[in-house]
Every structure is written in C-alpha cells, then in structure tokens.
Image (cartoon, grey):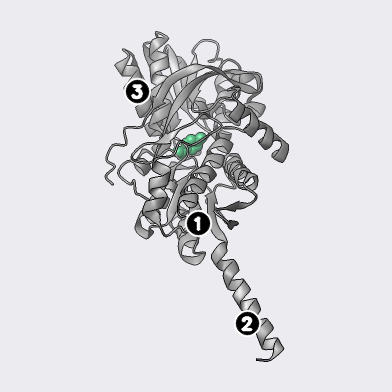
Amino acid sequence: MKLATLALAALALAANADAQTKLKVGLMLPATGTYAALGTAIDNGFKLYITEQGGKLAGREIEYVRVDDESDPAKATDNVNKLIKRDNVDVIVGTVHSGVAMAMAKAAKDSGTLLIVPNAGADAVTGPMCAPNIFRSSFSNWQPGYAMGEVVAKKGHKKVVTITWKYAAGDESVRGFKEAFEKGGGTVVKELNLPFPNVEFQALLTEIAATKPDAVYTFFAGGGAVKFVKDYAAAGLKKNIPLYGAGFITDGTLEAQGADAAGLFTTLHYADSLNTPRDNAFRLSYAKTYKLQPDVYAVQGYDAAQILAIGLAAVKGDVSKKAEFAAAVEKAKIDSPRGPFTLSKSHNPVQDFYLREVSGKENKLVGVASKALADPGKGCRM
Ligand code: PHB
C-alpha cells in the first residue's frame, strides 16, 4: 500500500473507534418558554456530574445532542424521534413538562432506547407506561402533593381551594394533595384551573377571595410560579389566606419573587439548607462552576447523570445490555445531594419530602414531612 492510502486507512480506523467510544446523550429539555430556566438548571446539573468524572462514563467520552422541546406536547413525538432515529442517541435525558414526557416515554418504550427523566412528574411514566429502560431521577406528581396534604391537614385547616394549570402535572399534584388532605379530615371545596402556560390569574384570585377558604394549595413552576406568587400577594390574599404548594412554586424563583414569597411553606425532595457534607460539596461545586446557586432541577439533572453512571459502569459502557443496566440501577443507593435514595420497582425515587419555609433567598429546611415516600406506581407491570 502507498503511504497516502495507509494514512487514509488509519484515519478511517480512528474515526470508527471514536464513533464507538463516544456515548451520545440526547438532551431533550425546554430552552424557551415558562420552563426555560428549569431546562438550563437540569443541563447544568447533568454536565457538572459528568465533568466531575473527568468528562467520561465507563471509559466513554460524552457527546451531547440537544433539542429544545419548548414544553410543547404537540411537537414532542417529532422531537424525540429526531434523537432516536436521526441522531441515533444511546440515551435520552428529558424532560420538564409531563405532557412532553409521556410522548417520550412512549417512544422509549417502543424503541427500547434508554430514557432518564430528570423532572417531569407524570404519574403514568412510572405507572402504566413504566418499562425496564425508563428511569426517573425526580419525583411523581403525586408525591409532593401527597406530602403537603398531610401537612395542611395537621395544621388544622378544613376547607381548601386548589389552583393550578390544567394538564397532567397540575391535575396529579392536586390529586395527591386531596388524597392525603381528605384522609386527614379536610375538604377540597373548589378546584380552579387555567390552561398551561397561561398566567392570567386575576379572575381566579377574585374567586378565591369570594370563597374564603382556610388555605390554598397550588402547583405552578418556572415563570408562571413567579407571577402567581406576586399576583397572590398583590391581590391582598397572602395576609388572609395561607398559600401552600408543591415546592416548585418557590424553587429557582426566589430571586424574582422577592418579599412576596417570604414565609411560604412548601414540600419538596430538596431544600436549600440541608447542610449535609454531600449537599454542601455539591452546592459549592455548582456555585463555582456556574456562578449560580443550585435548585431542585439542578439536583435532578445531576442525579440523572449518576443513574446513567451506575448503569453504564455495570455494563462497561455497553448500553445494549439493558437487563444488566436495569439490575444495577435497581439495587443502587443513589448518593444524591438531596439525601440518598433508591428507585421503586417502577423506577421512581423513594425519597424523603421536606417541609421548607421561604426565608430570604432560601427554601429553609423545617423538617421531614414524609419519610421515604414511595409513589404507588399504579398500573406498572414489568
Ligand atoms: C411537570 O410538568 O411534570 C412539571 C413541570 C415543572 C415542575 C414540576 C413538574 O417544576
């Protein structure tokens, strides 16, 4: 062979080896819209863990392919298929919005592609749509709602109005709240809704004032959560009718909400003042890297990478070994900044839910509202 031909052959070999060794991660997250900041925090958290591992998992370098899903369920199937069919990714990480996540779960189930959900709480993802190749590093919508239902009942409130966006996350959050609150002797007297991602709250706030409940329970997140908390205070409701929520109402939003969020009680699987060595190390590392404080979304992104690392280590980087990958993750205790957690049979975190109170720019830990709370995983067969 001529020297030039040899050189070309060597180049081709090297390119081939590179293609085999790089692990393609498809990040399907919102980069625009009311959940854009949540997508960024997840992306940051995920990459932080990978960077801490020297940029490699199981010896394979990571290559990212990104899709902005716009939190739009109507575009979700096309978007996820771009990653699966066009880009041929090894694993999909996403997303924030429950409606988008359900389309992703269907595509992952049908194609067998590995999917790790770093936020969206759609109960169905670890319920009827559960699969050996689908994992969640976050929560089910039922979980923080249920934890808050117990808290509000114990506080002695009897009549509650709920207010949320009309889609899976809002509906399921309210359902979880209602289950625990009514078990504890309370009644949900009115369920108010508006379409996602609308923020015209005025008419609904007027209705709350007229109904005069003992308290209000809410699920909003991202930009919508910022506006809701500000509007609730501006309507003069905050001083008369206590507002409780799934912790998303005040997570990653306090800078923008300012004094209007002060004193709000929420339940979530993270808080800003856990003060454990694990969380302190994570917070320091995140703050140094991004010049920002982390929030629950950053933690969920970080832990999605940890789940991937655990599975990949067990299969030595070979994602086709799905049963071994799942077995390793199923028996793992994930060393999360939130506190260690395991996955349920349906692959949803079994974790503590904290009661937090807003103080300054922090969701301060008050205590554990619900210890090792597991989603019932209704309808999951695998
Ligand atoms: C969801 O759609 O499941 C969702 C979105 C934002 C959150 C939590 C849940 O903060």
Residue neighbourhood size for the residue with mark 3, other residues' Cα within 10 Å, grouped as few (<14), some (14–19), many (≥20): many
Q: Is residue 94 visible?
A: no
Residue positioned 51% across, 10% down in the render? 240
Task: Specify the quadrant that holds the N terminus.
Answer: bottom right
Q: Nearer the viewer, residue 362 or 30?
A: 362
The mark that comes first in sequence, 1 or 3, is 3
Instruction: Kindly identify which residue carries mark 2.
Output: 9
Q: Position of residue 192 (x, y in %)?
A: 41, 27
Instruction: Kindly identify which residue carries mark 3.
Output: 178
Amino acid carrying mark 1 in the image: Gly
Q: Which quadrant holds residue 234? A: top right
Q: Which quadrant holds residue 59? A: bottom right
Asked whether, in this view, residue 138 is left or right of residue 186, the answer is: right
Q: Which mark is residue 325?
A: none
As helix, strand or loop, the secondary structure at mark 3 comes to helix
Residue positioned 65% across, 29% down in the render? 256
